[in-house]
Amino acid sequence: MNKKLKNILAVTGAVTAAAAAMYAVNALDEKRDRRRYLQSGRMVEVRGRRMHVYTCGAGSNTLVLLTGQGTPTPSIDFRPLIERLQDKYRIAVPEPFGYGYSDKTGEPRTVKNVVDELREGLRKAGVLPPYVLTGHAQGGVLTLYWAAHYPREVAAVVGLDTTLPAQEQENGVTPAAGLLMKAMNALAKVTPLRFLIKAGIMDKRLAPFTGGQSDVLPILRSHLASARASNCAVNELTAAASNCAEVAGLNYPVSCPVLMLVSGETCDALQKNPATAVDWLGEHEKIAMHAPKGKCSVLEGGHYLHHTASEAIAAEILDFVPPEEPQTPKLRKLFIRH
């Protein structure tokens, strides 16, 4: 064996050993974080994996808050809205697989799979239908599929700047891009990226998702770091276009009241972009007005309306779905073991 080949093998062996060691360190740290950052809701078994379902409040109406893509911890992210509604309704935030405290999964992230997993998780957590489905962004795709296929489970729908089924081309991820994202996620498992995220390199991006609680930032760092090393999120992104196509021909049942809350900033941004052919407000008005009891309102704020316009959202929901049994339960606190 010549010297050059020996050197190549030595370097390859050293890199492989370093990657294996980093993989073990990352896995150990993720396991440690699971023990340190305890969920505030219930963990239920769904298809052999654990799903986190956060609940609070009381009343005859149950609001189910459904996250959009890329939110590290939905049960924390929705906090501003929860705080304004939890004394009027029962509220549930089921975290899909790959999000927050829930396990990851290798199952295809089709709209059917995700909806059926969430339905099972809610029932096992003791949260029974009918539901007022409240979906943000891609969560709107879930509400449309859910209401169309399981109409008896849906009392009403509230959309928070929801994704439009017509956006399937915009949401498409090319096979090459999908492979690149999976490769980057695989690299995250064998590099110090987890510890760089936990050190704060992405805090600027994470800050809006704290639900107004700066002390939960370490939890978000940990959950984001775990997601970066998982193909679960990539699978969801690559399925976005086909999921939009899946619901493109569906409508909410005529018996289902629909409230569409649209971001004024999103409307302005799309109107100013000549390359955008989507009438954001008009398309949401069409969706809402398909039902005899439908309403569409424009709220001031960006795409994440529940971050900055939670008070206005709460007022719209209270008017659209009046609570029948007001209660004053306490909001559960997150428990962090230091």
Image: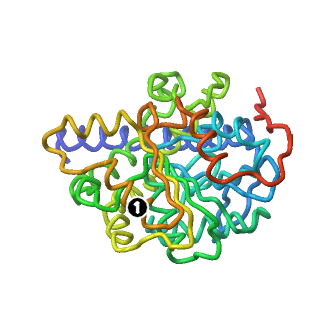
Q: Which element type, helix, strand or loop, lies under badge 1?
A: helix
Could you tell me which residue is drawn at 36 percent across and 62 percent down? 239
Could you tell me which residue is drawn at 36 percent across and 39 percent down? 15
Please state which of residues 303 and 292 is positioned toward the viewer in this rendering.
Answer: 292
Question: Label 1 amino acid?
Answer: Ile
Residue receiving disc 1: 287
Position above or below: 325 against 117:
above
Query: Residue 256, percent across and down?
Result: 56, 68
Could you tell me which residue is drawn at 43 percent across and 51 percent down? 162
Query: Residue 102, percent across and down?
Result: 63, 53
Q: How many marks?
A: 1
Q: How is the image coloured?
A: rainbow
Please state which of residues 134 and 39 is positioned toward the viewer in this rendering.
Answer: 134
Query: Residue 95, percent across and down?
Result: 61, 53
Answer left or right for 41 relative to 209. right
Query: Residue 312, percent across and down?
Result: 57, 35
Q: Which corner quadrant of the image does residue 125 belong to? A: bottom right
Q: Residue furthest front?
A: 292
Answer left or right for 69 relative to 60. left
Please state which of residues 139 and 218 is positioned toward the viewer in this rendering.
Answer: 139
Please state which of residues 136 and 34 is positioned toward the viewer in this rendering.
Answer: 136
